[in-house]
């Protein structure tokens, strides 16, 4: 096995292969970051609607609960296939990467909305009463009082979810998106040693997720001290 | 015209009616203390007045105009003139002491920043907390937090100040520093409604004392009368129990 690795190595680490892996890394990162970024924004919106008590929004709240509870319970692979079969006839020629990214958005919005909701609910109601008695509007309470106090509750599970999702995007390889895992398969199919091929992919996943974990840990520390 | 007039006010939490029928006229600059056993509706009355537990029936007039608790504009006007200090202080944990005091005049009332800050520091000075203006609430003792909470309420320039058991959560040693602060305010001309179990304090600062029981005002009179010569049996019983120790 080692002989084979040594034999393949010079050719494997040629510029074109590294570029190929880097591009695949880019796709994995793009799916994760765009998906989770959108998930944070829409997750926040959903969480805010769900903690609001206006009767006016009751039907919307019910719909959102249905969405969140459904999508949290479907395997990511199934979401990928559903999105693909829904989008393809609607938008012919939609790229596989965009289909996969939309799938990530759908799942991460559902997941992160729950993370954010529990963060918002961790703020004692007295804080909100204090703000209300001082004439803060709902939005002012949200942005000046509730959110600044809930980040430290939201951030650790949200970061864990995003880091975990870097790995879960590998399921998009089933659709044919050339992300890291698919890139590994392709390299092996081209005849490189599987240990070398997937070893390189392993390192690439680590390079993506480790800095993100560190960054989250840094933010967490900074938020906890303020 | 009374500064604050409460007529037949009732409210509760869900099916439980806590406040049954409270009528209380309060003149400008008066300090009215509410006394009575736990669960008699004292705190609920304050919460109802500022609309945190909206009244289910009855009327409230501030400066002669009726408060509509179902209208945001009316609530906004009301809370512009009325402030509450809570038993648990409720300082914003994500803001420094100074920010807690400036945020309402600055962001909600949109007053000039320099003026807000100067006034906030004056109020903090007044409650003896100016030296801690950079600290976060969780670094302060309960008594210090409560004094900041009083400064925060005053910085909104209220005409009416509601004080809801402001010393109940404090260490006995810290009670006096807060009571001294309030004592110093009674000369400001702010109308105050105080819920307190500190009877000596109530007796000293109040212009009138209202005895509450089971969601109603049983009796209302001067501190001398309520503590010295109560007319109602319920008041007599409560006062004698309280004053015995």
Image (tube, coloured by chain):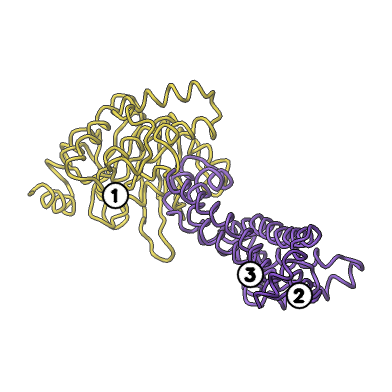
Chain colours: A purple, B yellow
Q: Is residue A62 left or right of residue A130?
A: right
Element carrying mark 2: helix
Q: Please name the residue shown 49% across and 30% down the image.
A: B105
Q: From mark 3 to mark 2, how far is it between C-alphas? A: 39 Å
Q: x and y percent of residue A25 in the render?
A: 72, 60
Mark number, residue B217:
1
- What is the x, y in percent for residue B7? 40, 46
Between residue A152 and residue B41, name the one nearer to us.
Answer: A152
Mark number displayed over residue A68: 3
Q: Are marks 2 and 1 on the same chain?
A: no
User: Which residue matches tag 2?
Assistant: A188
User: Residue B210, image x and y in percent?
Assistant: 26, 44
In the picture, which quadrant includes the N terminus of chain B?
A: top left
Tag 3 subunit: A
* Label 1–label 3 contact, CB within 8 A: no
Residue B163 visible somewhere in the drawing: yes
Comes first in the chain, label 3 or label 2: 3
């Amino acid at each position: 096995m080692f002989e084979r690795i040594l034999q393949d190595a010079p050719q494997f680490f040629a510029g074109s292969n590294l570029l190929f892996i880097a591009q695949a890394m880019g796709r994995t990162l793009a799916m994760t970051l765009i998906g989770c970024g959108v998930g944070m924004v829409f997750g926040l919106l959903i969480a805010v609607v769900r903690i609001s008590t206006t009767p006016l929004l009751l039907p919307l709240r019910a719909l959102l609960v249905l969405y969140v509870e459904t999508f949290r319970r479907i395997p990511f692979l199934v979401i990928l296939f559903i999105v693909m079969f829904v989008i393809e006839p609607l938008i012919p020629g939609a790229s596989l990467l965009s289909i996969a990214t939309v799938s990530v958005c759908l799942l991460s919005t559902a997941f992160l909305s729950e993370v954010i909701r529990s963060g918002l609910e961790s703020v004692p109601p007295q804080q909100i009463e204090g703000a209300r008695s001082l004439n803060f509007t709902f939005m002012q309470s949200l942005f000046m009082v509730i959110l600044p106090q809930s980040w430290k509750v939201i951030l650790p599970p949200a970061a864990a979810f995003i880091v975990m999702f870097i790995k879960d995007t590998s399921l998009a390889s089933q659709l044919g998106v050339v992300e890291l895992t698919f890139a590994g398969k392709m390299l092996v199919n081209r005849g490189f040693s599987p240990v070398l091929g997937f070893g390189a992919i392993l390192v690439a996943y680590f390079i993506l997720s480790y800095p993100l974990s560190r960054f989250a840990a840094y933010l967490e520390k900074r938020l906890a001290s303020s | 015209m009374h500064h604050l007039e409460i007529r037949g006010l009732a409210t509760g939490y869900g099916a439980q009616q806590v406040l049954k029928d409270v009528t209380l006229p309060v003149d400008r600059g008066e300090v009215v203390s509410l006394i009575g056993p736990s669960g008699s509706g004292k705190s609920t009355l304050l919460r109802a007045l500022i609309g945190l537990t909206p009244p289910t029936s009855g009327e409230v007039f501030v400066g002669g105009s009726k408060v509509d608790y179902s209208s945001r504009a009316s609530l906004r006007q009301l809370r512009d003139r009325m402030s509450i200090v809570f038993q648990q202080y409720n300082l914003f944990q994500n803001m420094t002491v100074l920010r807690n005091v400036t945020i309402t005049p600055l962001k909600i009332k949109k007053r000039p920043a320099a003026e807000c800050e100067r006034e906030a520091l004056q109020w903090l000075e007044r409650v003896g907390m100016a030296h801690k203006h950079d600290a976060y609430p969780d670094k302060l003792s309960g008594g210090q937090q409560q004094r900041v909470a009083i400064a925060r309420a005053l910085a909104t320039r209220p005409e009416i100040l509601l004080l809801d058991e402001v010393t109940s959560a404090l260490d006995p040693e810290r009670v006096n520093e807060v009571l001294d602060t309030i004592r110093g305010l009674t000369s400001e001309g702010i109308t105050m409604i105080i819920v307190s179990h500190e009877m000596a304090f109530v007796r000293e600062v109040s212009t009138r004392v209202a005895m509450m029981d089971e969601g109603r005002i049983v009796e209302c009179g001067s501190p001398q009368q309520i503590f010295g010569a109560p007319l109602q049996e319920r008041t007599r019983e409560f006062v004698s129990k309280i004053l015995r120790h």
